[in-house]
Image (tube, rainbow, N blue to C red):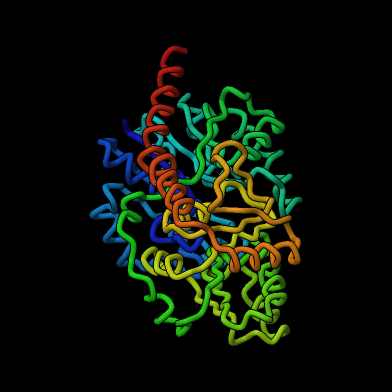
Amino acid sequence: MRISFVIPYFYPAMGYGGTPRFAYELARVLARRGHRVKVLTTDSAGRSRIPSDVIRSIQKNGVGGIQVRYYRNVSSQLAYRQRFFFPPRMFFDMRREVMQSDVLHIHDLRSLLAVAAHSALRSLHKPYVLSPHGGLQHLGKRTAKTMFDLLWGSAILKEAAALCAVSPSEARDAILLGVEKQKIHNFPSAVDAGQYRSLPERGRFASKWNVNGRRIILYLGRLHWIKGVDILIESFRLLSDLPDVQLVIAGPDDGAESSLRSLVHEIGFGDRVTLTGFLNDGEKTEAIVDSQIVVVPSRSEGFPLALLESLACGRPVIMSSACDLGDWMPKQPAWSTFLSEDAVDLARSLRAMLQQGVDEQSLMNARNLVLTAFSSDTLAARAEGLYESVMASYAST
């Protein structure tokens, strides 16, 4: 199949979180399975643009067997701060690119890239698959999102041949917004199982960041209000009687770093809280391996990738009740939940897990589950079947 992805940010812009990671893993494995996969994206790398030499190299040689076409945004700051991606050249090329594809997968609902793709697809009577990646709810920027949906979003959503829901709550949201139930397919996060078959030795991360001998509580993800890192810091304040415990906050700034640093200073725990900034895949795995507990404190979250990454490394997880696994993943002793936005309940859960731990067999069972049921190979096989079904249904109409 000739498969095209339209997405505002893509490899190597992994600082944007789970969306580009999901898309890259899916595209990489689909290409390995013999499909021609092409990604249309922008040059945004977060605060800056992807370096031009990197773009030239990838556009010439591909990456992971994927063809990638990067388009320049008018403003990198608008792209990063406001998520306003405006690559004029892509809009001119979109119809031609759509004509050369058997099926197109739009990642992220509310972008002008999705609007351009939808317009071209509609005029050519071609099917498309949509992944909102947890973006259906109007959390923040409500007025702008409401206007977008009135102008374009509702049509893009309802006219998709299939919608890939990243969590049970996203599936429910899609139904409430008018998507037919039979069009909705479960596509939770996934990990590259090969990356976790052989784990790094313990101690590398702790040595690099000078936290040897400390029990590490780890947060992985963007520094944004919705991620609830402030709640984690407040709960850590309640563990002041455990001087050997270190809080490590690992992830790129997405608007909240300054306020989080101020909060750490306010509680007087500067030497017991480490902010690392963005970690690449290898560094992230080392951090997880060296941690005692990984925490997902989000105020709103679908199916958290950090949960899978941590369990794949054999580390236990405490996550907010706002995280939505539904019945997609059976309950495991390797992870537990706390009441969303309740720092006291989180502190209680952290203290209990630090004191009692999780038995090795439970951790091994959870690791094996992730590396089989939630691998990128499993995800790609599911996507392949979905694309073929979509193409067949459109061919018969």
Q: Nearer the viewer, residue 229 or 17?
A: 229
Query: From what the image shows, is residue 366 above or below residue 328?
Result: below
The correct choice, above or below, for 231 with respect to 126 in the image is: below
At a point 29% along the width and 38% down the height, the residue shown is 36
Q: Residue at x 46, y 37 (%)?
A: 105
Q: Quadrant of the N terminus?
A: top left
Q: Position of residue 389 (x, y in %)?
A: 43, 22
Q: Is residue 88 visible?
A: no
Task: Name the foreground residue: 323 vs 43.
Answer: 323
Q: Nearer the viewer, residue 252 or 217?
A: 217
Q: Position of residue 338 (x, y in %)?
A: 69, 56
Residue 321 relative to residue 375: left or right:
right
Q: How many marks?
A: 0
When asked about the image quadrant of residue 49, the answer is: bottom left
Q: Residue placed at 39% from the left, 63% from the top?
A: 281
What is the quadrant of residue 261 in the picture? bottom right
Along the line of sight, the residue nearer the viewer: 341 or 337: 337
Task: Kindly tell me whether residue 296 is visible in this rendering.
Answer: yes
Taking the view exactly as shown, the residue that stands out farthest to the left is 61
Residue 79 horizontal side relative to residue 199, left or right: right
Q: Is residue 101 above or below residue 24?
A: above
Q: Position of residue 259 (x, y in %)?
A: 68, 76
The location of residue 380, given as percent across then percent down, is 38, 37
Measuring 39% from the left and 27% from the top, which residue is drawn there?
Answer: 385
